[in-house]
Image: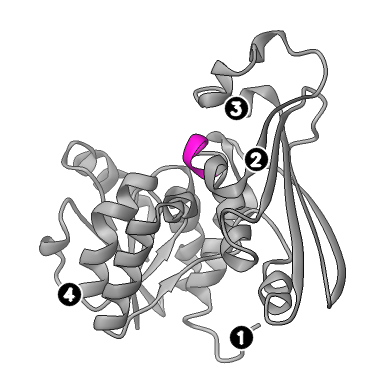
Amino acid sequence: MRHILLIGMGAIGRKVAGALRAESAALRLAVLVRPQYLADVRARTGALAPLAVEVVDRIEGLQATPELAVECAGHAAVAEFGETCLAAGMDFLVTSVGALADPALRARLERTARTYARRVLIPAGAVAGIDALAAARNDGLARVRYTSRKPPRAWRGTHAEKLCDLDAIGQPIEFYRGNAGDAARLFPQNANVAATIALAGLGFEATECSLTADPGAPGNVHLIEAEGAFGQLRIEVRGKPLPENPKTSTLAALSVLRAIRSRLDTIQI
């Protein structure tokens, strides 16, 4: 039986935990949350039966060590729990990929993973084509550009509010153009995709990034364009956001679920 730890029980965590009920015969689930959420999450996880769920507020409280920790709690959680999980013997899957725009944190995680023979895993998230970018990087990947187009409400509560009036937008407004590193730092809840693309391809400084608030956007629209010795690539994903969080694409949660289920699959794609 596989043993998985979810860090956080927000929109992504709830989506993933609910879907894992179907794996109750092959999976044991633990959930790590802040102390103030402990009682509420324990009550919610009762609905996941027959899936066995252990809810704790500190890693030391786990009955046994999971083989995989899945971070679903934001950038701060990557820094707080990443090295601890790796040193305890878990692989560490990062959903808040923008946290890795911090080179010091990235280096610490790499060093700890190497020391304890563990892995830091990055799911594809809300986009497609990450496998192609990573493959093209091996021979002549010359340019990568990422464009994000989302409804104005998806940018509320972010740095975008300082750059434009989201409530008064009547037509598409590009409020950010720069590199993926700055995008991930300025828009931590919205630019995880930019960080994933950067890590798969040319890196944070060389990956071009454009962010747009568009009242006519049919959901969260992600466009990846790349060129090099391999040829040209253009992939657009029009993702639907999770109902509980317009900043998060449903596909992002499903990519986490795929990563977990790959631990159970005999044939992997």
Q: Residue sitting at 11 percent across and 61 percent down?
A: 61
Q: In which quarter of the view is residue 147 placed?
A: top right
Question: Tag on residue 178?
Answer: 2
Q: Quadrant of the N terminus?
A: bottom left
Q: Examine the rendered structure and indicate whether residue 219 appears above or below residue 119.
A: above
Mark 1 lies on a secondary structure that is: loop
What is the distance, in whole Å, between disc 4 and disc 3 at their CAs?
Answer: 40 Å
Prevailing secondary structure of the magenta residues? helix
Of callouts 3 and 2, the N-terminal one: 3
**Which of disc 1 and disc 3 is earlier in sequence?**
3
- Left or right of 216 on screen, residue 154: left
Which amino acid, by three-letter code, is at mark 4?
Ala
User: Could you tell me if the residues under marks 3 and 2 are in contact, i.e. CB atoms within 8 Å?
Assistant: no
Residue 202 higher or lower than 135, as above or below: above
| Residue 96 drawn at (x, y percent) | 45, 51
Q: CA distance from mark 2 to mark 1?
A: 36 Å
Mark seen at residue 268: 1
